[in-house]
Image: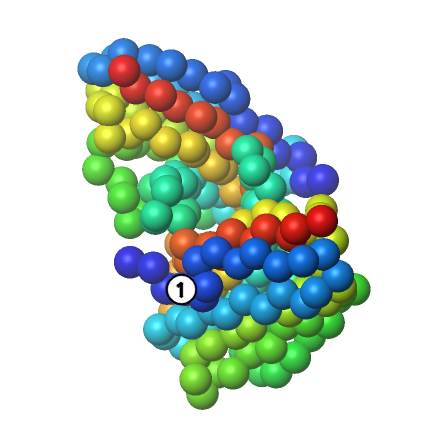
Amino acid sequence: DAGITQSPRHKVTETGTPVTLRCHQTENHRYMYWYRQDPGHGLRLIHYSYGVKDTDKGEVSDGYSVSRSKTEDFLLTLESATSSQTSVYFCAIISSRNTEAFFGQGTRLTVV
Amino acid sequence: SQQGEEDPQALSIQEGENATMNCSYKTSINNLQWYRQNSGRGLVHLILIRSNEREKHSGRLRVTLDTSKKSSSLLITASRAADTASYFCATDAVGGGADGLTFGKGTHLIIQP
């Protein structure tokens, strides 16, 4: 298995609070991604990174920010959590274009 | 927007039968990939087929790609109960930049023992 871990695995938080999810890789892969998975929508890209300090928005980036200060860590922050952000969040890594992605085990976030 | 769309959304078959899932996409691609997701787990890569390939095999998996129809199929032969999972196609679009793969909504496969 690729060395990719997400933390926490489960979190319950209150509306309006900030939340940070962490993705850590040991593969030294250049590309890192955050997706959310919701019933009926499949996986949708939130943000991605193509290098340290190089990030960009995906399809559903509103309400989210990211940071990548080191190759191995990609942080996803919900500045002020809303109930619509209740979802399962997946991090993925890719070594280079035209190759397979490796996924973390996911973080189940519930905003109450 | 979703690039890949799987069909059917759900499929239930008997153990030992073959399962076929289809994926359609909209734009030109570099490659198309299939992933499996067991309940509550992350996605696991199954197979990658490049745009210049038409068919690829891996164990009990057979993938075809028809770029003229912008479609792909995943065949699982001699299905087993352990094949019960959701299956997703993902496309790496030509000119897509660094934004990676675009996933469909998945086919939920149930293998009845």
Question: In the image, is residue A1 above or below residue B23?
Answer: above
The colour mode here is rainbow
Identity of the residue drawn at 24% across and 24% down: A83
Q: Nearer the viewer, residue B32 or A84?
A: A84
Q: Is residue B75 visible?
A: yes
Question: In the image, is residue B56 above or below residue A100?
Answer: below
Determine which quarter of the picture holds residue A79. top left
The residue wearing badge 1 is: B5
Q: Nearer the viewer, residue B24 or A78?
A: B24
- Residue type at the position of mark 1: Glu
Identity of the residue drawn at 27% across and 40% down: A61
Total numbered labels placed on residues in the image: 1
Q: Residues within 10 Å of mark 1 (few under 14, many from 20)?
A: many
| Residue extending farthest right | B59
Identity of the residue drawn at 71% across and 49% down: B113
Q: Nearer the viewer, residue B86 or A71?
A: B86
Q: Is residue A105 left or right of residue A54?
A: right
Q: Position of residue B108 (x, y in %)?
A: 51, 52
Q: Is residue B78 left or right of residue B94?
A: right
Q: Position of residue A68 (x, y in %)?
A: 43, 32
Q: Quadrant of the N terminus of chain B?
A: bottom left
Question: In the image, is residue B95 above or below residue A51?
Answer: below
Chain ID, mark 1? B
Q: Nearer the viewer, residue A52 or B108?
A: B108
Question: In the image, is residue B40 above or below residue B2?
Answer: above
Q: Is residue B77 left or right of residue B6?
A: right
Tag 1 secondary structure:
strand
Q: Position of residue A92 (x, y in %)?
A: 52, 42
Identity of the residue drawn at 63% across and 65% down: B19
Q: Is residue A68 visible?
A: no
